């Protein structure tokens, strides 16, 4: 069983910056060099190794980039270690889910160009991929989260040029959400927990969505500039 | 409920909304447990009115909202008719198709309230009589006798149901992309858009499970529509869904796929849904609307 828990297993991203301060290097600095200034500087760096998502539209795009990386990595693993009892139809559509989200990841990285944040590292432990119910139940959480994220982020873009393109990906996420929901519990695609009496689908602010996503991600973020 | 979202959206274009109704806390308090869920659409309308008084939305924004309302009346009446045609819908599927009808009814009520309180006049289908949601002589879903079995053949019913919902998704995408950044309607339109996409995907999934010959996926592959007459009349509903140039003319067939490969052409087109403009959408549904 191969676990895709590391950044190397996802496709490379252009211009990724590394913020990694290794533990070994930190200890070398702290122990070998007596200078207090150097020690404090290293402490500070190690204490806050969160990735800053950026400001304005860049922050919003990087936020979507995080959500899409989460889903893509989740489905890469789900396809590599499929659950028992997978039907042919499910195998085909599970590959589609992965491929669509990998495309969204790569596309957002290209749009962000030099402003893209580094690849994130996932925490795959909430999901037992070999178990059908566990895999699909977690897929539902992530797909509903993605739908609510796209719904909540659009109104904050200042460049209207992003709106048509982002909305093209948003409806695909909603189609994904329908599929995994109906797969586990037929006719639950529009559950009352997601859609209110006015027929409006759930919407989350980027900060609220990021908090829900965090248990699935090892990388920590500074999303203080995102809409709350 | 996403009341706070709606209020936030209004606050973006009108920062004084909270002051108008004596503070956000009081605003939200009025939507506490005392308000029954069924009363919320009505209560929301009075909230807008209380907050805005005579303030009106721009003509173009009202036109967008009324266009959305037109789409909702259209799909609501289609599913309402189907759900109330005895023997048409299979027992296993009725709960899902009834949910679609209910959501669309929610959209109608919501949009009517919103348009009225923003100073507009809500669209009403022609020949609409009696209960505003029971149309008589408003629609002809047979398209002048082209689909005479639309409410007797479950397969044909689902075919049209899929085409109409996929079109609704494209219509809302057009609305979202054409109202400019920061529009107060974008967030709301996105919320409805996501529900329409869940509907479209569900009807496709029902068709897939019922052995439809095109074996549709919940997502739109290439620009694939129905191939045989008279259903091939829906080919224009899927025009340009196979677009591979996105954003700043990025060729999405060059994007990374799984295991170090490049994504397949089909998967690339599935990963991006396409909008349609108002004129095109209205042209496509007009043969189903009586004048």
Image (cartoon, rainbow, N blue to C red):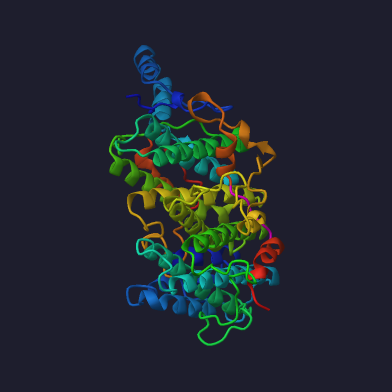
Residue B143: image x %, image y %?
Answer: 63, 69
Residue B6 position (above or below residue A215) = below
Q: Quadrant of residue B3?
A: bottom left
A94 or A45, nearer to the observer:
A94
Residue at 41% across, 36% down: A75
Instruction: Name the residue at 61% across, 51% down.
Output: B227
> Is residue B50 in the magenta section?
no
Q: Quadrant of the N terminus of chain A?
A: top left
Residue A227 seen = yes
**A37 above or below B191?**
above
Q: Which residues are magenta?
A: B273-277
Measured from the top left, where is residue B237 in percent x and y?
A: 64, 56
Left or right: B266 with respect to A95?
Answer: right
Quarter assignment of residue B14: bottom right
- Numbered label tally: 0
> In the rendered image, is residue B182 in sight?
no
Front position in the image: A135 or B45 = A135
Question: Horizontal and vertical percent for residue A203?
Answer: 46, 57
Give the image location of residue B262, x and y in percent: 56, 28
Q: For this view, does B123 lie left or right of residue B134?
A: right
Which residue is located at x 46 percent, y 42 percent? A67
**Relative to A85, is A17 on the left or the right?**
right
Find the residue positioned furthest to the bottom. B130
Magenta stretch, main secondary structure, is loop
Instruction: Name above or below for residue B291 compared with residue B182.
Output: below
Residue in the foreground of this view, choosing between A157 and B129: B129
């Amino acid at each position: 069983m191969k676990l895709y828990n590391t950044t190397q297993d996802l496709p490379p991203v252009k211009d990724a910056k590394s913020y990694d301060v290794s533990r070994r290097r930190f200890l070398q600095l702290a122990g070998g060099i007596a200078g207090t200034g150097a020690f404090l500087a290293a402490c500070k760096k190690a204490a806050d190794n969160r990735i800053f998502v950026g400001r304005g539209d860049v922050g919003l795009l990087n936020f979507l980039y995080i959500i899409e990386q989460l889903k893509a990595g989740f489905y890469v693993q789900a396809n590599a270690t499929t659950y028992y009892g997978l039907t042919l139809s499910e195998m085909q559509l599970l590959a589609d889910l992965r491929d669509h989200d990998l495309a969204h990841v790569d596309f957002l990285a290209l749009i962000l160009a030099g402003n893209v944040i580094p690849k994130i590292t996932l925490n795959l432990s909430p999901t037992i991929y070999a178990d059908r119910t566990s895999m699909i139940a977690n897929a539902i959480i992530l797909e509903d989260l993605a739908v609510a994220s796209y719904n909540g982020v659009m109104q904050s873009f200042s460049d209207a040029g992003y709106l048509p393109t982002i909305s093209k990906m948003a409806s695909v996420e909603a189609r994904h959400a329908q599929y995994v929901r109906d797969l586990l519990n037929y006719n639950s695609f529009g559950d009352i927990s997601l859609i209110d009496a006015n027929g409006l689908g759930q919407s989350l602010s980027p900060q609220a969505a990021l908090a829900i996503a965090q248990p699935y991600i090892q990388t920590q973020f500074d999303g203080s500039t995102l809409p709350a | 409920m996403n009341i706070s979202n709606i209020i936030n959206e209004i606050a973006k274009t009108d920062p004084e909304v909270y002051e108008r109704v004596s503070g956000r806390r009081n605003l939200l308090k009025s939507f506490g447990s005392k308000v029954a869920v069924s009363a919320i659409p009505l209560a929301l309308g009075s909230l807008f009115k209380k907050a805005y008084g005579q303030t009106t939305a721009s003509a173009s924004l009202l036109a967008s909202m009324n266009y959305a309302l037109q789409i909702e009346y259209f799909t609501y009446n289609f599913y309402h008719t189907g759900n109330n045609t005895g023997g048409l819908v299979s027992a296993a599927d009725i709960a899902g198709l009834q949910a679609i009808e209910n959501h669309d009814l929610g959209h109608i009520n919501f949009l009517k309230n919103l348009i009225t309180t923003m100073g507009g006049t809500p669209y009403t289908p022609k020949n609409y009589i009696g209960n505003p949601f029971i149309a008589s002589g408003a629609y002809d879903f047979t398209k002048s006798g082209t689909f005479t079995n639309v409410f007797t053949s479950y397969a044909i019913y689902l075919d049209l149901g899929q085409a109409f919902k996929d079109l609704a998704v494209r219509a809302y995408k057009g609305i979202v992309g054409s109202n400019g950044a920061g529009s107060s309607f974008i967030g709301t339109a996105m919320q409805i858009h996501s529900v329409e996409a869940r509907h479209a995907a569900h009807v496709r999934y029902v068709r897939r499970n019922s052995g439809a010959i095109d074996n549709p996926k919940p997502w739109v592959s290439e620009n694939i529509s129905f191939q045989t007459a008279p259903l091939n009349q829906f080919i224009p509903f899927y025009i340009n869904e196979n677009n591979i140039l996105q954003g700043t003319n990025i060729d999405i067939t060059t994007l990374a796929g799984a295991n170090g490969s490049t994504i397949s052409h089909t998967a690339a087109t599935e990963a991006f849904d396409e909008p349609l403009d108002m004129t095109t959408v209205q042209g496509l549904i007009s043969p189903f609307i009586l004048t």
